[in-house]
Amino acid sequence: MKTEIALLREMGARRPYTDSRPLEIVEAELDEPGSGEMVVRMAAAGLCHSDLSVINGDRPRDMPVALGHEASAVVESVGPNVTRFQPGDHVVLIFAPSCGHCVPCAEGRPALCEPAAAAAGRGALIGGGKRISRNGETINHHVGVSAFSRHAVVSEASCVKIDKSIPLDKAALLGCAVLTGAGAVLNSGDLQAGQSCAVVGLGGVGLTALLGAIAAGASQIIAVDLAADKRGFALELGATHAVDPNAPDAVAELRELSGGGVDLAVEVAGAAPALRFAYDVTRRGGTTVTAGLPNPKAELTIPAVSLTANEHTLKGSYVGSCVPVRDIPRFARMMLQGQLPIERLMTHRLGLDELNEGFERLAAGEAIRQVVIFD
Ligand SMILES: [Zn+2]
Ligand SMILES: [Zn+2]
């Protein structure tokens, strides 16, 4: 079948993207879904910083690629051997599908599925196939999702069914921002009611981590970002304090505020200095979780003895250490009950043809979560 996709031909376009227009909306051909695959019609798709990292080349991918990885959709048709879905089902797309059989999957850590990571690295679906082409040229899938497309062929392993009462625009954010942000706090960080938490980096994922900390019942939630307007917004959302990491003695200020450091510091800025800051404001015996994706060449330096002497835990969190079939419905219920008011993070609604404007806004720090609404 024919559909429209947002095609990225090469990385590293010059800004402003409103002039260089790295994403082109083109007609493409979708092959029939293979075994365990299905055709979905996108409902909504979020613009995430890791899409921007592909556009600017920080996270290199094979080109050309049909970009986008955070979406909600409706199942249009199912291919052979699809057992868990039928046409009309509402789904959230998962950019970290799982095979169910590799070692991480067997250990209950599906976000680390090895065949899924290998397939994503090749621009293929988890089953190995590529189903998008244009004038005979094969186009890569983006982490098995390719969300900025009117229709996509996806593996059923890349989908989690949601209740039809959940608004599809908000549901899109469950697939990346909420899993990654709220998951970093609630799963990886295991934040308990009454504990203190700092969130370093207040983009869409960071603010979702902040909402997760509020939902967990943290006694103190300290928002950290270079941008004053983002710190202000975090206070409006419910942070108890805000700290400018560039202020003189910012580490000492935060440690003072929290009586010696926070129980949990979550870094979501994707930059090594931000991670070091998070590490430095964690109390003795506390935990630092990093969910940011810095440039692959970035390195972190910490005093080696601090891990032992302070029993400091430093922990990575990929997609919020999520188990999607458990966490998507859980976070969706929290969203419906007002515990994760992620609609407050939705700053812009776009048409598919406004992606370049949207990514320019994201690169300029002028938006939190922008969502493409498909009609
Ligand atoms: Zn994302
Ligand atoms: Zn696996």
Image: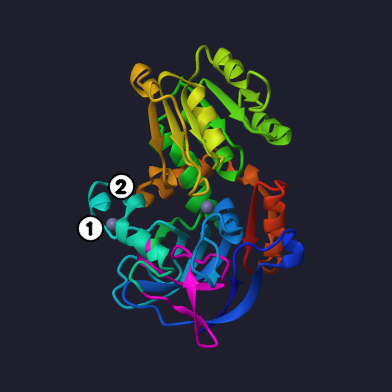
- Residue at the far right in the pictured view: 19
Q: Amino acid at mark 2?
A: Arg
Q: Which mark is residue 101?
A: 1
Mark 1 and 2 residues: CB-CB less than 8 Å, in contact? no
| Number of numbered discs visible in the structure rendering | 2
Q: x%, y% of residue 95?
A: 44, 58
At label 1, the amino acid type is: His
Q: Residue at x 57, y 12 (%)?
A: 256
Q: Is residue 130 one of those drawn in magenta? A: yes
Q: Is residue 344 left or right of residue 85?
A: right
Query: Does residue 253 appear in the picture of this structure?
Result: yes
Residue 36 place in picture, x, y as percent: 32, 72
The region drawn magenta spans 129-157
In the figure, is residue 14 to the left or right of 301?
right
Query: At 55% across and 40% down in the image, what residue appears?
Result: 271
Q: Which mark is residue 109?
A: 2
Residue 59, x across and y down, in percent? 52, 56
* Nearer to me, 286 or 245: 245
